[in-house]
Image (cartoon, rainbow, N blue to C red):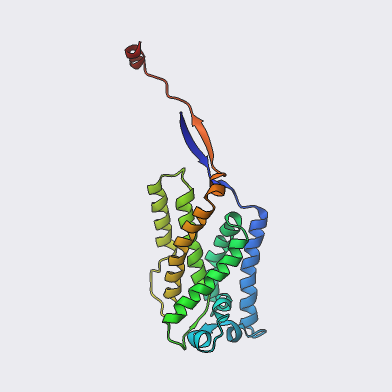
């Protein structure tokens, strides 16, 4: 008897609450940007982080709040384009404990690591480290879960998407590639760990069907008779 996997956890489609939650996440970043941009609330002064502020002045909370600050509209647009889609995936398949709670914690840890290598006066702002963390986690989770596709094809798909959407074609001095690298590096083991801890629940979504047996050819029947 041969079995074929036809559905996995990732076969589920996002519902309306997940779309609304993703939209809410997007609008939250936009509102925070507008409050800061028009000096309604000076978030860049209160929430941004540098090595001096975090490690020398002990303001460690800035490593978490600086995730929600963006330097300009282009910076915001580039980040939210990826962030919106990833929040939809995370809210659909991982739940609110993982997003936003665990994701925000990961963002702060990423910023702490990156700031420890930067000069003390350099400020780090933006959610790009979190985006790379989320992307790496999702691609890893896809490789582990979507077993109805061959492993080789899953790996090719993941690497291809990472090369197309995550790796820069040009180097810009104002971009924190360190945050990208740390976020991506953290996302892979986190995705593996999440799968291992929740593998029983994840496998419960798998649907297998029995394939019909192939009929014997005439000459095979004659040989067996």
Coordinates of residue 65 in the picture (x, y in percent): 58, 78
- Total marks shown come to 0
Coordinates of residue 8 in the picture (x, y in percent): 53, 45
- Residue plotted at (48% across, 47% down): 146
Residue 78 in sight in this render:
no
Q: Is 165 or 128 nearer to us in this picture?
A: 128
**Dividing the picture into quarters, in which one does residue 173 lie?**
bottom left
Coordinates of residue 207 in the picture (x, y in percent): 54, 39
Coordinates of residue 90 in the picture (x, y in percent): 57, 59
Q: Is 46 or 24 nearer to us in this picture?
A: 46
Residue 220 in sight in this render:
yes
- Residue plotted at (61% across, 67% down): 26
Task: Please give left or right for residue 56 compared with residue 222 in the image.
Answer: right
Quadrant where the C terminus lies? top left
Q: Residue furthest top?
A: 225
User: Is residue 173 depicted above or below 156 in this figure?
Assistant: below
Q: Is 158 or 38 nearer to us in this picture?
A: 158
Q: Is 69 or 204 nearer to us in this picture?
A: 204
**Dividing the picture into quarters, in which one does residue 22 lie?**
bottom right
User: Is residue 22 depicted above or below 206 in this figure?
Assistant: below
């Amino acid at each position: 008897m041969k079995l074929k996997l036809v559905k996995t956890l990732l076969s589920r489609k996002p519902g309306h609450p997940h779309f609304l939650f993703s939209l809410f996440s997007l609008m939250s970043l936009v509102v925070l940007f507008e409050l800061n941009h028009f000096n309604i609330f000076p978030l860049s002064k209160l929430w941004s982080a540098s090595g001096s502020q975090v490690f020398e002045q002990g303001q460690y909370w800035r490593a978490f709040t600086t995730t929600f600050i963006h330097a300009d509209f282009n910076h915001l647009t580039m980040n939210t384009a990826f962030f919106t889609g990833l929040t939809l995936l995370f809210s659909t398949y991982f739940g609110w404990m993982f997003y936003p709670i665990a994701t925000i914690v990961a963002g702060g840890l990423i910023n702490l690591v990156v700031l420890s290598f930067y000069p003390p006066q350099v400020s780090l702002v933006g959610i790009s480290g979190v985006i790379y963390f989320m992307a790496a986690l999702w691609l890893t989770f896809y490789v582990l879960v979507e077993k109805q596709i061959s492993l080789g094809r899953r790996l090719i798909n993941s690497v291809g998407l990472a090369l197309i959407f995550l790796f820069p074609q040009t180097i810009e001095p104002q971009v924190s590639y360190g945050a990208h690298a740390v976020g991506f590096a953290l996302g892979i083991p986190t995705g593996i760990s999440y799968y291992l801890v929740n593998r029983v629940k994840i496998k419960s979504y798998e649907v297998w069907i029995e394939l019909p047996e192939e009929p014997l050819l005439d000459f095979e029947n004659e040989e067996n008779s």
